Amino acid sequence: MPTLLITSSPSLQQHLQAALDRELEVYDSLSALAEQPQRGVQGVVWVDVDNQDEALLARLCRGDFGRARVIVLSSTPSDRQAVQWLGAGAAGFLHAFSQPATLRQADAVVAADGIWIGIGLMQQLCARFGQVARTDSPLLAQLTERERDVVGHLREGKSNKQIARDMDISERTVKAHLTAIFGKLGVPDRVQLLLKLSG
């Protein structure tokens, strides 16, 4: 199944092709893809949102053209755009010229049916969900005191690096605490953890 890229930018095509290290099937616009109704779009589809028909992009995200997992790219990304496209059903949103390693991670997460969002938006979501997460949840009794401290920092929307600095531990230790917390509470990530704690 080929990887599709919708862009009119040759430099973005070269950048993404080099990052993913595979051939891409490229369309200049969503309307060119939409003109092929007999083709059900499947797999990961990368779409450069700049100069695209937003109504067609929303339809692609909703699944009107098949079972595509859409990653929206923007050369001027904003949290507002991320919320807009993720809310429309996109599986990922990031800067069009992100580092190759970031593009590969996003590709792997979305191909595995996950959702890719940037660190800034993730921190905002954690802070929002953290405000409603119960500090007296009986689930917290399963955690060590240090793990509960990590959860307290997560509730404030802090990154691993910020938590490590505030707790005077290494970032690797924060990751170890998070892995233990996720395992004990049966959640895959920090957003799900905070959602579970909020009931």
Image (spheres, grey):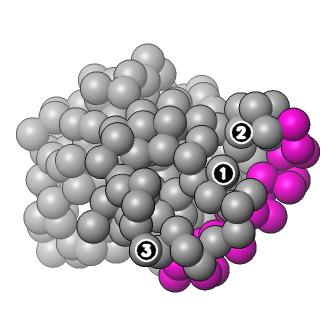
- Which residue is at 15% across, 60% downward? 62
- At label 3, counting other C-alpha atoms closer than 10 Å, the crowd grade (few under 14, some 14-19, many 20 or more) is few
Image location (x, y in percent) of residue 128? 34, 39
* Residue 51 appears in the picture as rendered: yes
Q: How many angstroms separate mark 1 from mark 2 (CA)?
A: 7 Å
| Amino acid type indicated by mark 1 | Val
**Relative height, residue 17 to residue 141 (above, below):** above
| Amino acid type indicated by mark 2 | Ile
Q: How many angstroms separate mark 1 from mark 3 (CA)?
A: 16 Å
Residue labelled with disc 2: 163
| Amino acid type indicated by mark 3 | Pro
- Which residue is at 87% across, 53% downward? 172
Q: How many angstroms separate mark 2 from mark 3 (CA)?
A: 23 Å
- At label 2, counting other C-alpha atoms closer than 10 Å, the crowd grade (few under 14, some 14-19, many 20 or more) is many
Disc number for residue 9: none
Residue labelled with disc 1: 150
Report if the CB atoms under discs 1 and 3 are less than 8 Å apart.
no
| Dot 3: element | helix
Residue labelled with disc 3: 138
Q: Earlier in the sequence, mark 1 or mark 2?
A: 1
Image location (x, y in percent) of residue 119? 56, 37
Report if the CB atoms under discs 1 and 2 are less than 8 Å apart.
yes
- Which residue is at 22% across, 36% downward? 84
Residue stretch in magenta: 168-188
